[in-house]
Amino acid sequence: MSVVTYELIENIGVIRLNNPPVNALSHALREGIQDAINRAQEDASKALILICEGRTFIAGADISEFGKPPKAPSLPEVISAIEGSAKPVIAAMHGTALGGGFEVALACHYRCALSSAKVGLPEVKLGLLPGAGGTQRTPRLAGVEAALELITSGAPVAANKAAQMNLIDRVIDGELLEGALDYARELVTAQAPARRVSDLMIDPASAPAELFEGFRSKLAKRARGQMAPQLIVSCVEAAVALPIEQGLAKERELFIECLQSSQSAAMRHLFFAEREASKVKGLDKDTPKREIASVAIIGGGTMGGGIAMNFANVGIPVKLVEIDDEALARGLSIIEKNYSITVKKGKLSEAQKDQCLSLIQGTTDYADLADVDLVIEAVFENLELKKEIFAELDNSCKQGAILATNTSYQDVDQIAAATRRPQDVIGLHFFSPANVMKLLEVVRGDKTADDVIATAMALGKKIHKVPALSGNCYGFIGNRMLRHYAREAQLCMIEGGTPEQIDSVMQDWGMAMGPMAVGDLAGLDIGYKARQGLTDEQKGDPKTYCIADALVEMGHLGQKTGAGYYRYDPETRARITDPEVVEVIETQAKAHGVSRRAIDNSEILNRLTCALINEGSKILQEGIAQRPGDIDVVYVFGYGFPAYRGGPMQYADTVGLKRIHDTIVMFGQRYGEEYWTPAPLLKELAESGKTFAEWARGK
């Protein structure tokens, strides 16, 4: 069946596109559109409608073609053919018209859409910019400021909002084709011309230099380190200053620059890795899933409350369990406060808030959990307490209920062994704040049933998380790697660095926050309490935690006490350098026989990133992670790793595994091999000249 068909309905030519699942702009689709437009110039049609079959209008480019030799016609050539049509062309949109799909619509002379449709230019999320006129035509219709916001955010807008922005001419209620035909007939009757967006001019006075300067400054904070947003501003500037032909040439030049960049390669890798992470190797895609119609959360603290919100937000009733009425009231008030903040930000209405809150009920009695389909334990990290809770759940919950632990690093198999149904036990590791952070680390125990895994992965998507599967080990994927990253941060600090220097290096490189600032945000007492349950051997080298322990013992627990590695302004929570902390660092260095020295920024960066990569290599080799991309997904969505670097394993591939390997060997010679011995897989790949991606494809 052809992906493009053409027919005359009375005197209206209808070009239908049908390239499932999302009508991506493949070569066949581009060729079909161009042929249909050319053919229609010679027939009896008075106007043309471009409409799509299936669930959506053109949802964007076929990114599987990126990096491959281009095939004519290119998208700009197709767009030129549409805009050059002597007969008016009307885009009729439903579903989502995104990226190249919306650029096709912008090239049409008129645009109509169902009220449920959304339009947008999300290329920036792949480290790209619109390369077929999006940056030139959008500001001509919507104005410069609105175009900058739309294109640099990549967020779609609903049809009614798009109509207010002058991006859509008519919003249709009812059947799309009939509405589009009626609109086309009106245009024909009115003898409406083939109105070309490229003929419009932008008044330079509407876009002074200060507007662009202000937007660049805003993007420097909002999209720190990313090149595509800044180049989008340059393209829109060109739309104001240059004729359309020169503006399009500038756009194409900068699009190619983005396409060939390591940033776009990383973000495109992440796009595919996110989708791949939800697939479980060896698990039949038809594996049945258990129905999750009700959920219970054990523990009403910040984490438990945040987890509860995820389920209420998608209409699943939640029972929040606490130890007594006072703790329960406190937990429910935290949830209410979080929803109120969301309302204040304009992301939720009062009615929606009330609806969500109505789905969360509190209890102090495990007997109330007899009929729930899923229980998530979210108490503090004490293995014995968790085992006691699971033994109680085993007695209270119905057969077939899934019993999940939100532990960050405890042994899921030991927790499961506290029940008579280890096949129903799984780890669901949410990240704080759980109602905001997108990652869900799904931890498979040794006896976890296939249908429980399948249910957990599907449920992650339902509650709008990015699920990634991990095997069971101390810390799973994310926190196991984080221990080594944090170790090097502590060692760099005691050897001569400061919290400000280490945080600045990592934040300037792209991390959302530096390691010391993260520690203050999470609370230094959490790690302190966890270490109290370990033997000296398990704790490791005292130099890797002595500063943190000393701060906790001084009452410096982080942001919650107004002091940690930094002091915090009580009003703004702004970080302030604390001379007391410098004294602590110097005292601990002296106590542990460390001669402090000046540490170069590049050494800090290499020690922290190589520590992540080396441990990630071990995790891959052991099968804890299914694939390198899963590790990247965990770190980008759970730990603030910069998306434009693609995650630790993609970054390693970009830098070159031989270079990473040789750096680790050099650190081993300088600091000892206890921490700096290349992982066997890393060594093997470095010597063979392969990448993690190539290794994964060969498995």
Image (cartoon, grey):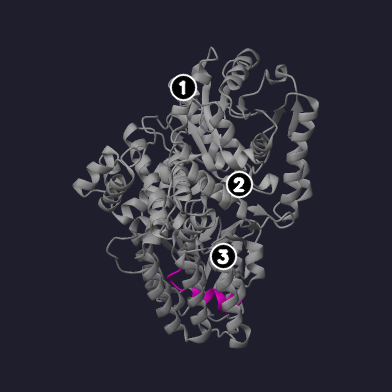
From mark 1 to mark 2, how far is it between C-alphas?
A: 38 Å
Residue at the disc numbered 1: 449
Residue at the disc numbered 3: 221
139 within the magenta span: yes
Residue 39: image x %, image y %?
A: 38, 71
Residue 370: image x %, image y %?
A: 68, 17
Identify which residue, 543 or 130, lies in the foreground: 543
Residue at the disc numbered 2: 520
From mark 1 to mark 3, how far is it between C-alphas?
A: 45 Å
Identify which residue, 657 or 88, lies in the foreground: 657
Q: Answer with left or right where residue 137 lies relative to residue 600.
A: right
233 within the magenta span: no
Label 1 or label 2, whichever comes before in sequence order: 1
Label 1 or label 3, whichever comes before in sequence order: 3
Which SS type dominates the magenta stretch?
helix
Amino acid type assigned to the residue bearing label 1 in the image: Ala
Of the numbered discs in the image, which one, if any, rests on residue 571? none
Q: Nearer the viewer, mark 1 or mark 3?
A: 3
Is the residue 399 above or below the residue 567 in the image?
Answer: above
* SS of the residue under disc 1: loop
Crowd band around label 2 with a 10 angstrom C-alpha radius: few (<14), some (14–19), many (20+): many
Residue occupying the point 33% across, 58% down: 65
Magenta region: 130-143
Residue occupying the point 61% across, 17% down: 388
* SS of the residue under disc 3: helix
Label 2 or label 3, whichever comes before in sequence order: 3
